[in-house]
């Protein structure tokens, strides 16, 4: 799924839970996953690792067909910049990547120069 989530899908988020410190990550991938529960760590079935997820409020209704909740999950794959800084995403980022510093409940994260691997952003980090 792209980073351009419909904010209407995020209306019942009330908390973002980070499993890793997002300050150390230039970007995370975000996706909506179907999960059995509103809260707690959801199951994760991708390569790579989950770095965060959202929890839903008590008013979130399950999908009538599947009985599952749509929740946002934040993750990284083995070839992402955090583990392969000179790899394919040395500059640029995957379509679903957003800056984790822009993540809030009910608001889709956004791309920033840092998440996109801008040379200006990288230089600012090195000199800070």
Image (tube, rainbow, N blue to C red):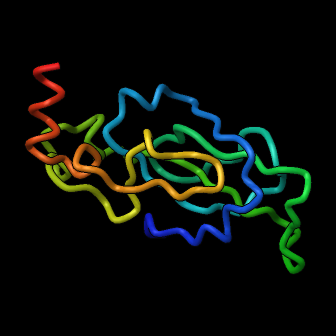
Looking at the image, which residue is at 52% across and 53% down? 46
Looking at the image, which residue is at 69% across and 57% down? 71
* Residue nearest the observer in this picture, 62 or 36: 62
Looking at the image, which residue is at 28% across and 35% down? 83
Residue 123, given in percent of the width and then of the height, sits at 9, 32
5 vs 83, left or right, is: right
Q: Quadrant of residue 23?
A: top left
58 vs 127, left or right, is: right
Residue 70, given in percent of the width and then of the height, sits at 72, 63
63 vs 23, left or right, is: right
The image quadrant where one finds the C terminus is: top left
* Residue nearest the observer in this picture, 17 or 33: 17
* Residue nearest the observer in this picture, 83 or 111: 111
Looking at the image, which residue is at 67% across and 71% down? 8
Q: How many marks?
A: 0
Q: Residue furthest top?
A: 128
> Image height check: is 13 above or below 9?
above
Residue 61, given in percent of the width and then of the height, sits at 88, 66
Residue 18, given in percent of the width and then of the height, sits at 58, 33
44 vs 98, left or right, is: right
Q: Quadrant of residue 16?
A: top right
């Amino acid at each position: 799924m792209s980073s351009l989530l419909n904010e209407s899908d995020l209306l019942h988020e009330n908390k973002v839970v980070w499993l890793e410190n997002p300050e150390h990550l230039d970007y995370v991938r975000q996706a909506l996953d179907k999960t059995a529960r509103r809260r707690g760590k959801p199951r994760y079935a991708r390569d790579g690792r989950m770095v965060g997820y959202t929890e839903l409020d008590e008013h979130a209704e399950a999908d009538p067909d599947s009985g599952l909740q749509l929740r946002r999950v934040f993750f990284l794959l083995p070839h992402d910049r955090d583990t392969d800084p000179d790899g394919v995403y040395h500059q640029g980022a995957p379509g679903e990547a957003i800056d984790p510093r822009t993540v809030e409940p009910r608001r889709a994260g956004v791309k920033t120069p840092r998440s996109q691997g801008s040379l200006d952003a990288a230089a600012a980090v090195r000199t800070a």
